[in-house]
Amino acid sequence: MQKVRPAAGHPAWVVLGYDAARRALNEPGISKDMLAALQQAGDVVAEGLPGPEFSRHMLNVDPPDHTRLRRLVSRAFVPGRIAALEAAVRAMADSLLDELDAAGPGAAVDLIEGYAYPLPFGVIGELLGIPAADRPRLHAWFGVLLTGWAGDPPPGAVQASDGIVAYLRALVDAKRQSPADDLVSVLVAAEDDALTTQELLSSLFQLVVAGHDTTASLIGNGVVALLDNPAQLQALLADLGQLPAAIDELIRFTAPVPHATFRMTAEPVTFDSVQIPAHEQVLVCLAAANRDPDRFSEPDVLDIGRGDGPNLGFGHGIHYCLGAPLARLEARIAFETLLSRYPGLRLAADRNSLTWAHGDGLVLRGLTSLPVVLDPGRRPG
Ligand code: HEM
């Protein structure tokens, strides 16, 4: 373990190995209480947008608040509810590809803007109860907020953040007046008794971010990884039933969430014989843990048939990704629909011109765009 100063400017102790990462994610002395950390440690902590008043969600608190907030939101993520989304996700995937197809045979289209991003955004919109007509506006604001930046926010980010905050406040007001069968209404019904308005708004903000950008990155990163490894792509095309395992391997290999989110020592902690003082940041590198040679054989090789067990791409411990079943379902349908319609899919840009840039670059790793040709080609076998 070593102390580093990442590009975003805040010094942190970095955890790299697989076992160490699992232990760090379970270490009670390492806290996720962002507001407490801001009070105690000041500028060691990045506030981000839209600011601390929107930061009171499950990913930024410790038990017992974490337990309470996670339990409330979990109601929308019960397995039956996720499985019931399958037909709707498939219809969305097909309709997005139909729109891209309209560009004509051989045309270059952006798979991020036209498919990877709007698909999970539409799904989280359905789950939360965001009207379809409002999604493009919200989608555009989140796009600005999550574009690569380090240090000061780029022009437009503050306005985008203000737009999102005002929109979510208005959505909550609307659901207070006319509740529906959606997650915003479930949380509004619990407001005051089980969660504060600040926690409600923060949770919605976090769910929209966590619920679309990550899966969008997995789809984009995964397509590039498969095109980079044609033998793996052909093996997958020969049997799309391998997709569930392939998706876990694509998460391991392409790291849509390369580092766990903000953590800080609440007290002095001794970790692997290193003394970390109180109120210092700890950065758990999931991408490195997932390529730890002590845990994975040939870790730098993409192997969709790899049988060496779970990876840490969805985190570990009490903050393990609540949306993992939804993300797996979305990714399975996204790849299944794309690859069965366009087995001859190919890049329409120089591979070296692709750029990965997102947020502070630490927690989200996704492509800015992915020009491809949707070639019907032929499936092997
Ligand atoms: C490929 C897609 C995804 C990846 C790789 C991913 C990854 C992660 C990771 C690594 C964490 C733990 C972060 C930490 O401990 O600091 C996490 C937490 C979380 N994720 Fe995901 N995620 C994905 C998709 C989703 C989706 C679709 C949702 C749905 C809304 C979602 C909702 C959440 C929530 C609510 C948490 C916080 C859990 C808690 O604090 O108890 N994620 N995710």
Image (cartoon, helix red, strand yellow):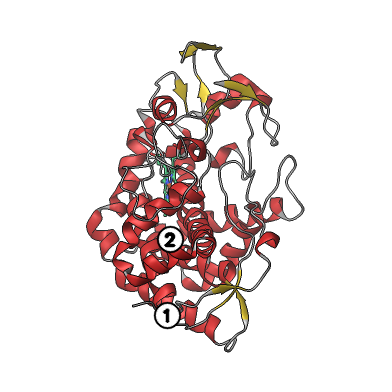
Can you say whether 314 is above or below 345 in the image? above
The image shows residue 303 at horizontal and vertical percentages of: 40, 53
Q: Position of residue 346 (x, y in %)?
A: 56, 73
Q: Regarding mark 1 in the picture, which secondary structure is present there?
A: helix
Q: Residues within 10 Å of mark 2 (few under 14, many from 20)?
A: many
Q: In the rendered structure, which disc, 2 or 1, sits on the residue that comes first in sequence?
A: 2
Residue 125 visible in rendering? no
Residue 341, numbered label = 1
Q: Is residue 232 visible?
A: yes
Q: Which mark is residue 124?
A: 2
Nearest-to-viewer mark from 2 and 1: 1
Q: Which amino acid type corresponds to the residue marked 2 in the rendered image?
A: Ile
* 56 on left or right of 88: right
- Counting from the top left corner in percent of width and height, residue 207 is at 45, 51
Q: Is residue 196 left or right of residue 3?
A: left
Q: Disc 1 residue type?
A: Arg
Q: Is residue 194 above or below residue 5?
A: below
- Disc 2 within 8 angstroms of ligand 1 (CB): yes
Q: Position of residue 370 (x, y in %)?
A: 61, 66
What count of labels does the image hold? 2
Seen from the viewer's position, the closer of residues 147 and 105 is 105
Task: Residue at 49% x, 65% y: name it.
Answer: 230
For the C terminus, give its image quadrant.
Answer: bottom left
Residue at 42% x, 31% y is 18
Q: Mark 1, residues whose alpha carbon is within 10 Å: few (<14), some, or many (≥20)?
A: some
Nearer-the-camera pick, 43 or 113:
113
Q: Is residue 199 above or below residue 14?
A: below
Name the mark on residue 194.
none
Query: Which residue is at a point 59% across and 55% down the rendered structure image?
Result: 164
